[in-house]
Image: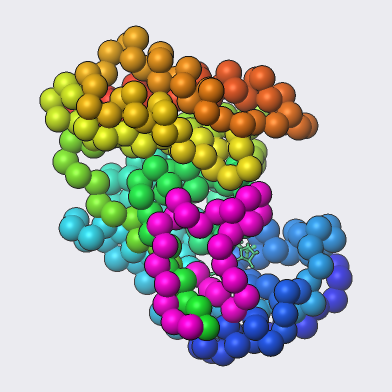
């Protein structure tokens, strides 16, 4: 393990000031399931670790049918996974949490850390993106809110600037008649990063799809939306033929690479398969 200086600030202001003063090699520590691996494997040059666990106010979870789910930056994947409101109201997010690593890892890993790592294959990002999550950020100039959709700029890259600390996430409440699904495809059943992950959230009025959001994981530099496929569905009657068309469109909209997990062609084909399957599941859930 490389040596680093360790800090335990007691307020957001102090943590933010430290990050600004210490420079680019200083990093926030939440659960450490990514950060410590990166330090140990020398994937990241880290001079200072700023542990935010002693800062109050980041361990709250509130669920309200009108405002939705709000959770702080220190809430772990496991805490959300076992919250009954999450399982009932956001089954796509609950499934992503269930499929993230193992219980041991989920007991330490925070959802906000999963987002801040900005891996294109992160499990929690597709459902949060499809459901319109808003991210809250403490900055040296004050609080900032941003749709999660605008947060990512590339693999491992976000709009966070030096001194910025994410304080929590707000996940809006679903409207009546909406259905959600998250499907992850990997080579193993557990402890496996997604080869492809697809989240679908749709709303309908009777037979008519009034809104559809599709998020594709591990098939681009960031988790992608499939706006063309979404446009095909919006305002349309959902038929098998339309689902097939939307699947094909999502395939055309993703930009996968080949790596040790799968070839680009295989990933693209799986986007078609999983998008069709997730759309059917979301349709069934919305009835
Ligand atoms: C064995 C193993 C298996 C895994 N399997 C999966 C998997 O199946 N699916 C998956 O999606 N992930 C998987 N992961 C990664 C997953 O555990 C992490 O992405 C985790 O969610 C990160 O949260 P953390 O609290 O541990 O973050 P940390 O490691 O503490 O931090 C991660 C990054 O986010 C930054 N950060 C953290 N919190 C904040 C904040 N509040 N504000 C600003 N920046 C912040 C840190 O500086 C760091 O850059 C796995 C990890 C391991 C070790």
Whether residue 148 is in magenta: the answer is yes
Residue 173: x percent and y percent?
25, 52
The quadrant of the picture showing ligand 1 is: bottom right
Question: Which residue is rendered at x = 27% and y = 29% of the image?
Answer: 234
Question: Which residue is rendered at x = 61% and y = 37% of the image?
Answer: 220
Q: Which residues are magenta?
A: 141-166
Q: Is residue 22 above or below residue 181?
A: below
Quadrant of res 179: top left
Is residue 99 visible in this depiction of the protein? no
State left or right for residue 205 relative to residue 34. left
Q: Nearer the viewer, residue 229 or 206?
A: 229
Q: Is residue 30 above or below residue 114?
A: below
Quadrant of res 46: bottom right
Residue 242: x percent and y percent?
33, 15
Q: Quadrant of the N terminus?
A: bottom right
Is residue 26 visible in this depiction of the protein? yes
State left or right for residue 69 relative to residue 26. left
Question: Which residue is rendered at x = 36% and y = 50% of the image?
Answer: 132
Q: Quadrant of the C terminus?
A: top left
Q: Is residue 173 above or below residue 143?
A: above
């Amino acid at each position: 393990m490389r040596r680093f200086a360790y800090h335990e600030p007691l307020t957001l202001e102090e943590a933010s000031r430290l990050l600004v003063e210490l420079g680019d090699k200083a990093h926030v520590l939440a659960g450490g399931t990514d950060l410590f691996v990166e330090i140990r494997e020398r994937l990241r040059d880290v001079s200072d670790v700023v542990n935010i666990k002693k800062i109050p106010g980041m361990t709250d979870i509130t669920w309200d049918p009108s405002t939705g789910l709000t959770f702080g930056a220190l809430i772990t994947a496991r805490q959300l996974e076992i919250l009954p409101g999450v399982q009932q109201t956001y089954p796509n997010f609950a499934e992503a949490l269930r499929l993230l690593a193992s219980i041991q890892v989920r007991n330490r890993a925070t959802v906000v850390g999963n987002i801040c790592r900005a891996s294109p294959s992160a499990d929690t990002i597709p459902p949060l993106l499809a459901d319109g999550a808003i991210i809250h950020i403490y900055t040296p100039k004050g609080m900032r809110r941003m749709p999660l959709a605008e947060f990512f700029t590339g693999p491992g890259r976000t709009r966070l600037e030096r001194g910025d600390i994410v304080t929590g996430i707000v996940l809006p409440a679903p409207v009546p008649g909406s259905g959600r699904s998250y499907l992850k495809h990997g080579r193993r059943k557990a402890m496996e990063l997604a080869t492809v992950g697809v989240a679908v959230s749709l709303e309908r009025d009777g037979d008519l799809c009034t809104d559809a959001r599709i998020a594709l994981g591990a098939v681009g530099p960031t988790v992608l939306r499939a706006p063309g496929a979404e446009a095909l569905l919006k305002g349309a009657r959902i038929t098998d033929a339309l689902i097939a068309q939307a699947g094909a469109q999502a395939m055309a909209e993703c930009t996968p690479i080949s790596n040790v997990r799968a070839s680009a062609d295989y990933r693209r084909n799986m986007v078609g398969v999983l998008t069709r399957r997730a759309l059917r599941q979301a349709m069934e859930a919305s009835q």
